[in-house]
Amino acid sequence: MADSTRVQDSIFIDMKYIVLYRKLGFKEVKQDIFILNYGTAEIVIEAENQIFIFNGMQHPLLTYKDMVKLECIDRLLKKGYKPKNILFCDQFDLVLLDANGNTFASFLFDEYGKKYEKLLSGFNYSGSEMIFLYTSQLAGGLIDYKLKMYTADGIYYKGFFEKNAKLYPDNFFTFDEIKIGEDLDFIFRGTELIKYTGSASDVIIPDGITRIGTGAFWNNTVINFVRLPESLECIAGDAFVYCENLKKITIPKNVELIGDNPFAGCPELILDNLSESFILESGILFEKNKTCLIHYTPSKKESEYTIPETVEWIGKHSFYKCENLKKAVITKNASYMGNNAFSDCTNISLENHSPHFKYIDGVLYNSDLTINYHYSLGSGITDVKLQKGLRTIGRNSFWNAKNVEKITIPETVRQIGYNPFAYCINAVFTVNSPNYSVYNGALYAADFSELVCCTAKVIMSGTIELHEKTKSIGRNAFTGCETLEKIILPKSIKMISRGAFSGCKKLVSIEIPKDIEFIGDWAFNNCESLSELNIPIGIKLENNTLKNCPAEVLRY
């Protein structure tokens, strides 16, 4: 049986980091053992033991900072630095030696986001040595990094890891070479388009932009045509997700990177491709060697599709909302699937020929039955008994499974990804795992500190009483609960996570406790009956916390 002490939020079993390993190029040679050979060195990840081994040394994989360390070593090796010149000491997280064995630069790492910003703000540089402050993250299917380089000549941000940078460069630079003029319809950061804020149906992105950022056009239902500039090199994951009226995009010739399906939820979109880094074949977008399937055009009329045998990676949401598909055949070389590739394919069932997967009663698992990736909406299975040995219930794996009436969680489950049961409105849970509990029909962590999921089925009366120990309302916990009309949160609540009450269209009243510390993005998305939200003065709301929600925010 799985070690029940390793539960929710343990990094080593977080599917996001399994994806990171695979994005870096690691292969799972046996259960929980991942290896990547660089020619000059080899890194071995022992996920279950929460370590990686490099240069004969064991390094922990316990924190997000540890993941940054692993990713930076990978970046150095792929750039061409020799493993013998990558060392570790007490004063710094990593030291890079030059060809003569002298220190070239010392690295300090921290987690992407607030902790890295704190590292930057608290760092005092004095001396002539070079010190690099580094962080990275996996976001939208791409690995992003930030690097601030302190040298005797000044502070720099570029010129070390870039594609055209030499080993041990003797000059760095600070600013992007291309400057983008002011445009009120766009938010830029350097040469990256962060957000489109305009209202035009036809959008021309300025020349000079090299990257379309994650979610830059998220849920924009006005646009129907976007012209991408020839300068573009990268389209990040989810860049155009849910752009329901978007009809045409041409991928320019200089694009080399595309993240997790940027075009998911664009039912009318017709793609064209000019980049040699990708192949567009009969409306299906692949990486150039066809080992990764990125996007399947939803409007294709075919009811069956056999994935090419070249494909090893079936991308996140790559078949999202392909309602005409009734059958997809997974071929023998497919070894990994991103976040529910067949999400919202209302008629789909699968046929599996890959030794890396098992397909049992409408559910797709890895070969060891430790992770489930997908539940087929067209399978007809309403009583889902997840397989014994399952450790992780994958993110979004049961998304919108309205026909499911019962889900049995086996004793081996120790992690549930970002709520996989969103819109499972008719489901009730039977829980055998010591890491989870059911109270008043809702699914909780074992100690009731987090509410994981509550379905519409268990709140037919319109109200529900939460456990008094609950501190967190999990991500998408009440999503799609159109029966919910009123909820009084216990005084213990500290966090309302992203999308927690999204789609609760009849919710008219919610009492937020005074000790709340965080309310996430999209938390009350489409709560169209909610007219008033009372929250403490110090609580910041994100841009989309009240998306499509008329509630007046009252501070107390």
Image (spheres, rainbow, N blue to C red):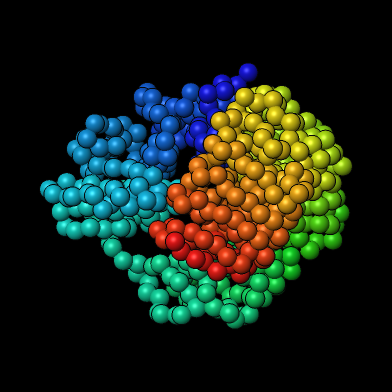
The residue located at (73%, 35%) in the rendering is: 429
The residue located at (28%, 42%) in the rendering is: 107
The reply to whether residue 236 is in sight is no
- Quadrant for the C terminus in the image: bottom left
Q: Is residue 363 above or below residue 508?
A: above
The residue located at (64%, 28%) in the rendering is: 413
Q: Looking at the picture, tell me which residue is in the foreground, 379 or 162.
A: 379
Q: Looking at the picture, tell me which residue is in the foreground, 547 or 47.
A: 547
Tell how many labels: 0
The reply to whether residue 490 is in sight is yes
Left or right: 90 as drawn, with respect to 3: left
The residue located at (70%, 72%) in the rendering is: 245
**Quadrant assignment, res 441:** top right
Query: Residue 519 at what x, y percent from top left?
Result: 50, 54
- Quadrant for the N terminus in the image: top right
Q: Is residue 547 above or below residue 437?
A: below
Query: Residue 553 at what x, y percent from top left?
Result: 52, 66
Query: Residue 17 at what x, y percent from top left?
Result: 52, 39
* Residue at the outermost left position: 127
Q: Is residue 191 above or below residue 139?
A: below
Left or right: 77 as drawn, with respect to 236: left
Q: Is residue 181 above or below residue 107?
A: below
Left or right: 355 as drawn, with respect to 167: right
Query: Residue 272 at what x, y percent from top left?
Result: 67, 68
